[in-house]
Structures are given as C-alpha cells and as structure tokens.
C-alpha cells in the first residue's frame, strides 16, 4: 500500500471531520486532526481519540454547570482565610477534600 498524497490526506481528514460531526464527536470534529505515529496501532489511536472526547465532554459539562450556577469566581481551600473564620482549622481544610 502506497503512502497517500497530501490531497488524498486532506480528503481523508475532511471525511473524518464530517463523520465525527455526524456522530456528535464534537472534539474530533472541531479540532485539527493529526495522523497517528507509525508505531501506534489503529486500536490504540482510536482509544486515544475516544478518551480525548470524554475529557473534552467532561470539561464542557463542568464549564456549563459553573456558568449555569452563575458563580462569579472559582475558589479553593488554599485561599480560605482561617484567621477570619475561627470555627475551622487549616487541618480540617486539608482533610475535607479527602473525605469526598
């Protein structure tokens, strides 16, 4: 099997983008497509593409929830002022995320 020309590769990439869009794989459909390295199997590349899609969808869902909640800024426990709030200690803030 011969190596595809640039024109053939562009057609293949356009076909992949079109099919991904039809399947609702928005990450694959809207981002630049890169050919996989020769040492990577087709199955491994497909797994990588699907994992990337999952990460992309999870991040979009998180962003939508934050936007819907209308939270002005995201904060973490590192910036919490324990001297202001006497009822909680630094130690409790460290342990809280571990309990969840």
Image (spheres, rainbow, N blue to C red):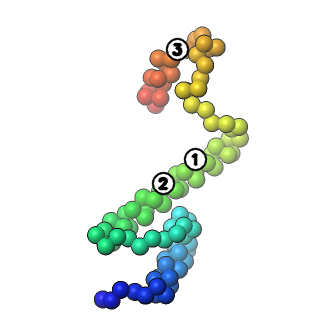
Q: Estimate the x, y position of residue 42 in percent, counting from the top left.
A: 33, 72
Q: Estimate the x, y position of residue 79 in percent, counting from the top left.
A: 59, 26
Residue depicted at x 51% and y 22% = 93
Q: Is residue 51 above or below residue 31?
A: above
Task: Give the quadrant of residue 77.
Answer: top right
Q: Estimate the x, y position of residue 62 in percent, counting from the top left.
A: 58, 47
* Callouts 1 and 3 close, C-beta under 8 Å: no
Q: Earlier in the sequence, mark 3 or mark 2?
A: 2
Q: Would residue 23 be visible to someone looking at this image?
A: no
Q: CA distance from mark 3 to mark 2?
A: 34 Å
Q: Is residue 40 above or below residue 3?
A: above
Mark 3 neighbour class, 10 Å CA radius: few under 14, some 14 to 19, many 20 or more: few
| Horizontal arrangement in the rendering, residue 47 relative to residue 29 (left or right) | left
Q: Residue furthest front?
A: 6
Mark 1 neighbour class, 10 Å CA radius: few under 14, some 14 to 19, many 20 or more: few
The residue carrying mark 1 is 62
- Tally the marks: 3
Q: Estimate the x, y position of residue 32 in percent, counting from the top left.
A: 52, 69
Q: Secondary structure at mark 2?
A: helix
Residue depicted at x 47% and y 29% = 97
Q: Is residue 73 above or below residue 49?
A: above
* Callouts 2 and 1 close, C-beta under 8 Å: no
Q: CA distance from mark 2 to mark 1?
A: 11 Å
Near-viewer residue (14 or 66): 14
Nearer the observer: mark 1 or 3; the answer is 3
The residue carrying mark 2 is 55
Q: Earlier in the sequence, mark 1 or mark 3?
A: 1
The residue carrying mark 3 is 89
């Amino acid at each position: 099997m011969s190596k595809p020309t640039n024109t053939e590769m562009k057609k293949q990439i356009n076909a992949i983008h079109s099919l991904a869009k039809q399947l609702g794989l928005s990450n694959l459909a809207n981002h630049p497509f890169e050919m996989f390295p020769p040492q990577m199997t087709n199955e491994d590349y497909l797994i990588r593409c699907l994992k990337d899609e999952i990460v992309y969808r999870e991040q979009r869902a998180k962003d939508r929830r934050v936007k819907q909640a209308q939270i002005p800024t995201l904060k973490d426990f590192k910036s919490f002022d324990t001297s202001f709030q006497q009822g909680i200690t630094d130690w409790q803030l460290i342990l809280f995320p571990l309990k969840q």
